[in-house]
Amino acid sequence: MGSGKKTIAEKILSNHAGRSLEAGDIAICDVDFCFGQDGTSSIIIDSFR
């Protein structure tokens, strides 16, 4: 973003990545929670496990 202000997503992902992140960065993070809203969500969630 460049202005020094971070979005809530940038703050959360930065915390989990252990470094400062901004839009466009690639990071590997542990997933604490996963939410899906349709019938195919369980297939996707299982693939993350």
Image (cartoon, helix red, strand yellow):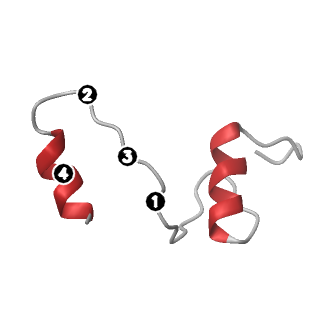
Image position of 30 (left or right of 48): right
Task: Classify mark 1: residues with Cα within 10 Å, few (<14), some (14-19) or many (20+).
Answer: few
Residue type indicated by callout 1: Val
Q: Which badge, 2 or 1, comes first in the chain's sequence?
A: 1
Image position of 13 (left or right of 47): right
Residue where numbered disc 4 is placed: 44
At 10% across and 31% down in the image, what residue appears?
Answer: 39
Disc 1 to disc 4, how far (Cα)?
13 Å
Q: Residue 41 carries which label?
A: none
The reply to whether discs 2 and 3 touch (Cβ–Cβ < 8 Å) is no
Name the quadrant containing residue 25.
bottom right
Disc 4 to disc 3, how far (Cα)?
10 Å
Image position of 32 (left or right of 25): left
At 18% across and 51% down in the image, what residue appears?
Answer: 44
The reply to whether discs 1 and 3 touch (Cβ–Cβ < 8 Å) is yes
Residue type indicated by callout 4: Ile
Task: Classify mark 2: residues with Cα within 10 Å, few (<14), some (14-19) or many (20+).
Answer: few
Q: Say what secondary structure mark 4 lies in.
A: helix
Residue where numbered disc 1 is placed: 31
Q: 26 or 38, which lies in front?
A: 38
At 88% across and 42% down in the image, what residue appears?
Answer: 3
Q: In this view, does 43 lie above or below 20?
A: above
Q: Residue 34 carries which label?
A: 3
Image position of 49 (left or right of 25): left
Q: Looking at the picture, how far across and down is residue 49, in whole percent?
A: 25, 66
Residue type indicated by callout 3: Cys
Q: Looking at the picture, how far across and down is residue 37, in whole percent?
A: 25, 27
Q: Residue 37 carries which label?
A: 2
Q: Which badge, 1 or 4, comes first in the chain's sequence?
A: 1
Q: Looking at the picture, how far across and down is residue 5, in whole percent?
A: 85, 41
